Image (cartoon, grey):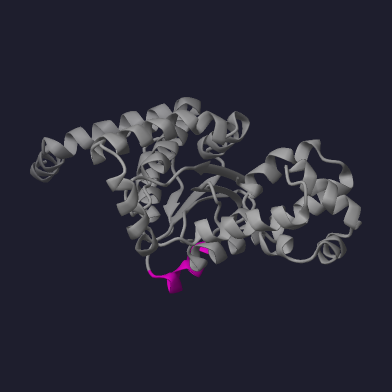
Amino acid sequence: MNVLEDLRRALPELSSREARAARHLIANYPMAGLTTVAEFAEQSGVSTATVLRLVKRLGFPVYAEFQEALRSHIEESLQSPLLRFGERKVRDEATDKSYLARTSDRMAEYFSSLPDLIPEKEFDRAAALLADPKRDIHLLGGRYSSHVARYMGDLLSAIRGRVHPVSGQTQTWPQFLLDMGRGSVLVVLDVRRYQDDVVQFTHAASRRGATVILLTDVWQSPAARSADLVLTFPVESPSIFDVLTVGMGVAEALVGAAASKADTAGRTRFETLEDLRTRLADGTFGQERAKSKRK
Protein backbone atom coordinates (compact mmCIF):
# COMPACT_ATOMS: atom_id res chain seq x y z
CA MET A 1 0.00 0.00 0.00
CA ASN A 2 1.27 3.47 -0.91
CA VAL A 3 0.07 5.75 1.88
CA LEU A 4 1.29 8.93 0.24
CA GLU A 5 -0.53 8.20 -3.01
CA ASP A 6 -3.69 7.26 -1.11
CA LEU A 7 -3.48 10.52 0.82
CA ARG A 8 -3.29 12.59 -2.35
CA ARG A 9 -6.24 10.78 -3.89
CA ALA A 10 -8.38 11.05 -0.76
CA LEU A 11 -7.67 14.74 -0.18
CA PRO A 12 -10.66 16.16 -2.15
CA GLU A 13 -13.11 14.03 -0.14
CA LEU A 14 -11.76 14.82 3.33
CA SER A 15 -13.32 17.19 5.85
CA SER A 16 -11.48 20.46 6.43
CA ARG A 17 -9.83 19.16 9.63
CA GLU A 18 -8.94 15.80 8.10
CA ALA A 19 -7.47 17.63 5.10
CA ARG A 20 -5.36 19.76 7.46
CA ALA A 21 -3.89 16.63 9.05
CA ALA A 22 -3.40 15.02 5.63
CA ARG A 23 -1.54 18.06 4.27
CA HIS A 24 0.71 18.09 7.33
CA LEU A 25 1.57 14.44 6.72
CA ILE A 26 2.16 15.00 2.99
CA ALA A 27 4.45 17.96 3.74
CA ASN A 28 6.39 15.99 6.38
CA TYR A 29 6.11 12.48 4.96
CA PRO A 30 6.62 9.96 6.46
CA MET A 31 8.11 11.27 9.72
CA ALA A 32 4.93 13.07 10.86
CA GLY A 33 3.08 9.75 10.89
CA LEU A 34 5.78 8.00 12.90
CA THR A 35 5.14 10.18 15.94
CA THR A 36 2.45 9.42 18.52
CA VAL A 37 -1.19 10.19 17.75
CA ALA A 38 -1.10 13.08 20.21
CA GLU A 39 2.05 14.58 18.63
CA PHE A 40 0.67 14.16 15.10
CA ALA A 41 -2.56 15.90 16.18
CA GLU A 42 -0.76 18.76 17.93
CA GLN A 43 1.59 19.40 15.01
CA SER A 44 -1.35 19.35 12.57
CA GLY A 45 -3.52 21.62 14.70
CA VAL A 46 -6.34 19.09 14.98
CA SER A 47 -7.70 16.67 17.58
CA THR A 48 -6.52 13.10 18.09
CA ALA A 49 -9.99 11.95 17.01
CA THR A 50 -9.47 13.69 13.65
CA VAL A 51 -6.14 11.92 13.13
CA LEU A 52 -7.68 8.55 13.91
CA ARG A 53 -10.57 9.24 11.50
CA LEU A 54 -8.04 10.08 8.79
CA VAL A 55 -6.13 6.87 9.47
CA LYS A 56 -9.33 4.83 9.22
CA ARG A 57 -10.23 6.54 5.96
CA LEU A 58 -6.90 5.30 4.61
CA GLY A 59 -7.89 1.73 5.50
CA PHE A 60 -6.11 1.21 8.83
CA PRO A 61 -8.30 0.07 11.74
CA VAL A 62 -5.65 1.07 14.28
CA TYR A 63 -2.84 3.64 14.35
CA ALA A 64 -0.15 0.97 14.81
CA GLU A 65 -1.01 -0.62 11.44
CA PHE A 66 -0.80 2.82 9.80
CA GLN A 67 2.70 3.31 11.24
CA GLU A 68 3.78 -0.16 10.12
CA ALA A 69 2.76 0.74 6.56
CA LEU A 70 4.88 3.90 6.77
CA ARG A 71 7.89 1.92 8.01
CA SER A 72 7.46 -0.62 5.19
CA HIS A 73 7.32 2.26 2.72
CA ILE A 74 10.65 3.56 4.02
CA GLU A 75 12.29 0.13 3.78
CA GLU A 76 11.09 -0.37 0.19
CA SER A 77 12.13 3.11 -0.93
CA LEU A 78 15.66 2.68 0.41
CA GLN A 79 16.38 -0.76 -1.04
CA SER A 80 19.67 -1.09 -2.87
CA PRO A 81 20.60 -3.58 -5.63
CA LEU A 82 22.86 -5.32 -3.11
CA LEU A 83 19.92 -6.06 -0.81
CA ARG A 84 17.96 -7.52 -3.71
CA PHE A 85 20.63 -10.01 -4.82
CA GLY A 86 19.49 -12.85 -2.56
CA GLU A 87 15.79 -12.13 -3.02
CA ARG A 88 16.04 -12.25 -6.81
CA LYS A 89 18.02 -15.50 -6.73
CA VAL A 90 15.24 -17.23 -4.78
CA ARG A 91 12.64 -15.96 -7.25
CA ASP A 92 14.70 -17.05 -10.25
CA GLU A 93 14.96 -20.58 -8.90
CA ALA A 94 11.19 -20.76 -8.26
CA THR A 95 10.10 -20.25 -11.89
CA ASP A 96 10.58 -21.96 -15.25
CA LYS A 97 10.01 -18.76 -17.23
CA SER A 98 12.98 -17.22 -18.97
CA TYR A 99 14.37 -13.93 -17.72
CA LEU A 100 13.34 -12.19 -20.95
CA ALA A 101 9.79 -13.51 -20.72
CA ARG A 102 9.46 -12.38 -17.11
CA THR A 103 10.78 -8.93 -17.93
CA SER A 104 8.44 -8.61 -20.90
CA ASP A 105 5.44 -9.68 -18.82
CA ARG A 106 6.32 -7.24 -16.05
CA MET A 107 6.76 -4.28 -18.40
CA ALA A 108 3.48 -5.05 -20.18
CA GLU A 109 1.72 -5.17 -16.82
CA TYR A 110 3.26 -1.86 -15.76
CA PHE A 111 2.35 0.01 -18.93
CA SER A 112 -1.24 -1.22 -18.78
CA SER A 113 -1.48 0.05 -15.18
CA LEU A 114 -0.38 3.62 -15.98
CA PRO A 115 -3.91 5.03 -16.47
CA ASP A 116 -4.71 3.89 -12.93
CA LEU A 117 -1.50 5.30 -11.45
CA ILE A 118 -1.56 8.70 -13.18
CA PRO A 119 -4.78 10.75 -13.05
CA GLU A 120 -5.66 11.94 -16.55
CA LYS A 121 -6.26 15.51 -15.38
CA GLU A 122 -2.78 15.72 -13.85
CA PHE A 123 -1.16 14.28 -16.98
CA ASP A 124 -3.04 16.75 -19.22
CA ARG A 125 -2.11 19.66 -16.97
CA ALA A 126 1.55 18.67 -17.09
CA ALA A 127 1.47 18.41 -20.89
CA ALA A 128 -0.21 21.82 -21.16
CA LEU A 129 2.52 23.38 -19.00
CA LEU A 130 5.22 21.89 -21.23
CA ALA A 131 3.44 23.15 -24.36
CA ASP A 132 2.95 26.72 -23.07
CA PRO A 133 5.44 28.88 -25.04
CA LYS A 134 5.26 31.60 -22.37
CA ARG A 135 6.97 29.33 -19.86
CA ASP A 136 10.64 28.39 -19.64
CA ILE A 137 11.23 24.69 -19.05
CA HIS A 138 14.01 23.23 -16.89
CA LEU A 139 14.73 19.51 -16.49
CA LEU A 140 16.65 17.71 -13.75
CA GLY A 141 17.38 14.07 -12.96
CA GLY A 142 19.54 11.95 -10.71
CA ARG A 143 22.48 9.69 -11.41
CA TYR A 144 20.62 7.56 -13.96
CA SER A 145 17.33 9.40 -14.43
CA SER A 146 19.22 12.45 -15.73
CA HIS A 147 19.59 10.55 -19.02
CA VAL A 148 15.79 10.50 -19.33
CA ALA A 149 15.63 14.20 -18.40
CA ARG A 150 18.14 15.13 -21.11
CA TYR A 151 16.34 12.99 -23.70
CA MET A 152 13.05 14.63 -22.77
CA GLY A 153 14.68 18.04 -23.14
CA ASP A 154 16.04 17.16 -26.58
CA LEU A 155 12.58 16.18 -27.78
CA LEU A 156 10.91 19.25 -26.29
CA SER A 157 13.42 21.63 -27.85
CA ALA A 158 12.25 20.49 -31.30
CA ILE A 159 8.78 21.97 -30.75
CA ARG A 160 9.50 24.92 -28.45
CA GLY A 161 12.29 27.15 -27.23
CA ARG A 162 13.52 28.01 -23.73
CA VAL A 163 14.25 24.41 -22.73
CA HIS A 164 17.12 24.14 -20.24
CA PRO A 165 18.47 20.84 -18.87
CA VAL A 166 20.11 21.31 -15.45
CA SER A 167 23.54 19.76 -15.88
CA GLY A 168 27.09 19.80 -14.63
CA GLN A 169 28.39 19.36 -11.10
CA THR A 170 26.03 20.02 -8.22
CA GLN A 171 28.03 23.11 -7.24
CA THR A 172 26.96 24.78 -10.50
CA TRP A 173 23.25 24.11 -10.06
CA PRO A 174 22.51 27.37 -8.18
CA GLN A 175 23.28 29.18 -11.44
CA PHE A 176 20.23 27.53 -13.00
CA LEU A 177 18.07 28.77 -10.13
CA LEU A 178 18.90 32.36 -11.04
CA ASP A 179 16.64 32.24 -14.09
CA MET A 180 13.73 30.48 -12.43
CA GLY A 181 10.62 32.31 -11.34
CA ARG A 182 6.83 32.19 -11.42
CA GLY A 183 6.75 31.52 -15.17
CA SER A 184 9.16 28.60 -14.95
CA VAL A 185 8.43 24.88 -15.03
CA LEU A 186 10.85 22.39 -13.49
CA VAL A 187 10.54 18.75 -14.55
CA VAL A 188 12.25 16.47 -12.02
CA LEU A 189 12.96 12.75 -12.32
CA ASP A 190 13.92 11.12 -9.01
CA VAL A 191 13.54 7.44 -8.12
CA ARG A 192 14.72 5.34 -5.19
CA ARG A 193 17.36 5.65 -3.77
CA TYR A 194 16.50 9.35 -3.89
CA GLN A 195 19.22 11.97 -4.27
CA ASP A 196 19.35 14.65 -1.64
CA ASP A 197 20.84 17.21 -4.05
CA VAL A 198 17.93 16.69 -6.48
CA VAL A 199 15.42 16.97 -3.63
CA GLN A 200 17.02 20.16 -2.27
CA PHE A 201 17.18 21.75 -5.73
CA THR A 202 13.47 20.98 -6.21
CA HIS A 203 12.60 22.66 -2.90
CA ALA A 204 14.69 25.70 -3.88
CA ALA A 205 13.07 26.02 -7.32
CA SER A 206 9.61 25.78 -5.78
CA ARG A 207 10.44 28.54 -3.30
CA ARG A 208 11.45 30.74 -6.24
CA GLY A 209 7.98 30.25 -7.71
CA ALA A 210 8.63 27.54 -10.31
CA THR A 211 5.88 25.03 -11.03
CA VAL A 212 7.29 21.56 -10.34
CA ILE A 213 6.34 18.41 -12.27
CA LEU A 214 7.80 15.34 -10.54
CA LEU A 215 8.20 11.98 -12.26
CA THR A 216 8.98 9.43 -9.56
CA ASP A 217 8.44 5.83 -8.50
CA VAL A 218 5.35 4.64 -6.66
CA TRP A 219 7.04 5.22 -3.25
CA GLN A 220 7.60 8.85 -4.23
CA SER A 221 10.71 10.95 -3.79
CA PRO A 222 10.79 13.44 -0.89
CA ALA A 223 10.78 16.04 -3.67
CA ALA A 224 7.01 15.42 -3.82
CA ARG A 225 6.64 17.83 -0.89
CA SER A 226 7.48 20.70 -3.26
CA ALA A 227 5.82 19.31 -6.40
CA ASP A 228 2.66 20.73 -7.94
CA LEU A 229 2.11 17.60 -10.03
CA VAL A 230 3.35 14.10 -9.18
CA LEU A 231 3.30 11.41 -11.89
CA THR A 232 4.27 7.98 -10.55
CA PHE A 233 5.43 4.84 -12.32
CA PRO A 234 6.68 1.36 -11.28
CA VAL A 235 10.41 0.63 -11.32
CA GLU A 236 10.72 -2.93 -9.98
CA SER A 237 11.73 -5.71 -12.35
CA PRO A 238 13.17 -9.24 -12.30
CA SER A 239 16.56 -7.52 -12.24
CA ILE A 240 18.40 -6.52 -9.08
CA PHE A 241 18.30 -3.03 -10.59
CA ASP A 242 15.27 -0.80 -10.73
CA VAL A 243 14.32 0.08 -14.31
CA LEU A 244 13.42 3.40 -15.90
CA THR A 245 11.63 1.82 -18.87
CA VAL A 246 8.17 2.90 -17.75
CA GLY A 247 9.45 6.30 -16.64
CA MET A 248 10.86 6.81 -20.13
CA GLY A 249 7.45 5.91 -21.52
CA VAL A 250 5.76 8.51 -19.30
CA ALA A 251 8.31 11.15 -20.37
CA GLU A 252 7.75 10.36 -24.06
CA ALA A 253 3.98 10.42 -23.58
CA LEU A 254 4.23 13.87 -21.98
CA VAL A 255 6.32 15.21 -24.86
CA GLY A 256 3.94 13.67 -27.39
CA ALA A 257 0.95 15.24 -25.65
CA ALA A 258 2.74 18.60 -25.50
CA ALA A 259 3.52 18.37 -29.22
CA SER A 260 -0.16 17.73 -29.97
CA LYS A 261 -0.98 20.97 -28.13
CA ALA A 262 1.69 23.01 -29.92
CA ASP A 263 0.44 25.99 -31.91
CA THR A 264 1.49 27.16 -35.37
CA ALA A 265 4.76 28.46 -33.99
CA GLY A 266 5.61 24.96 -32.75
CA ARG A 267 4.96 23.44 -36.16
CA THR A 268 6.99 26.15 -37.88
CA ARG A 269 9.86 25.56 -35.45
CA PHE A 270 9.86 21.83 -36.18
CA GLU A 271 9.76 22.41 -39.97
CA THR A 272 12.72 24.78 -39.68
CA LEU A 273 14.61 22.22 -37.61
CA GLU A 274 14.02 19.50 -40.22
CA ASP A 275 15.23 21.84 -42.96
CA LEU A 276 18.38 22.69 -41.00
CA ARG A 277 19.07 18.99 -40.40
CA THR A 278 18.70 18.20 -44.09
CA ARG A 279 20.95 21.04 -45.20
CA LEU A 280 23.61 20.13 -42.65
CA ALA A 281 23.55 16.47 -43.74
CA ASP A 282 23.87 17.18 -47.48
CA GLY A 283 26.51 19.90 -47.09
CA THR A 284 24.34 22.73 -48.38
CA PHE A 285 25.62 25.15 -45.74
CA GLY A 286 29.19 24.85 -47.03
CA GLN A 287 28.09 25.45 -50.65
CA GLU A 288 26.20 28.58 -49.70
CA ARG A 289 29.26 29.97 -47.94
CA ALA A 290 31.46 29.29 -50.99
CA LYS A 291 28.97 31.06 -53.28
CA SER A 292 28.83 34.12 -51.05
CA LYS A 293 32.65 34.37 -51.12
CA ARG A 294 32.73 34.23 -54.94
CA LYS A 295 30.26 37.07 -55.13
Q: Position of residue 263 (x, y in %)?
A: 49, 27
Q: Position of residue 101 (x, y in %)?
A: 27, 34
Q: Furthest-front residue in view?
A: 94
Q: Identify the residue shown where x is 80% and y is 47%.
A: 54
**Quadrant that contains the C terminus:** top left
Height in image: 282 above or below 33?
above
Q: Identify the residue shown where x is 11% and y is 35%.
A: 282
Does residue 178 appear in the picture of this structure? Answer: no
Q: Identify the residue shown where x is 33% and y is 54%.
A: 240
Q: Furthest-bottom residue in view?
A: 171
Q: Position of residue 15 (x, y in %)?
A: 87, 41
Number of dots carrying numbers: 0
Which sits in the foreground, 222 or 94?
94
The magenta stretch is 169-178
Magenta segment, prevailing SS (helix, strand or loop): helix
Does residue 286 appear in the picture of this structure? Answer: yes
Which sits in the foreground, 122 or 272?
122
Which sits in the foreground, 212 or 115?
115
Height in image: 173 above or below 6?
below
**162 is within the stretch colored magenta:** no
Horizontal arrangement in the rendering, residue 175 relative to residue 283 (left or right): right
Q: Position of residue 154 (x, y in %)?
A: 35, 44
Which image quadrant is residue 289 in? top left
**172 is within the stretch colored magenta:** yes
**Quadrant that contains the N terminus:** top right
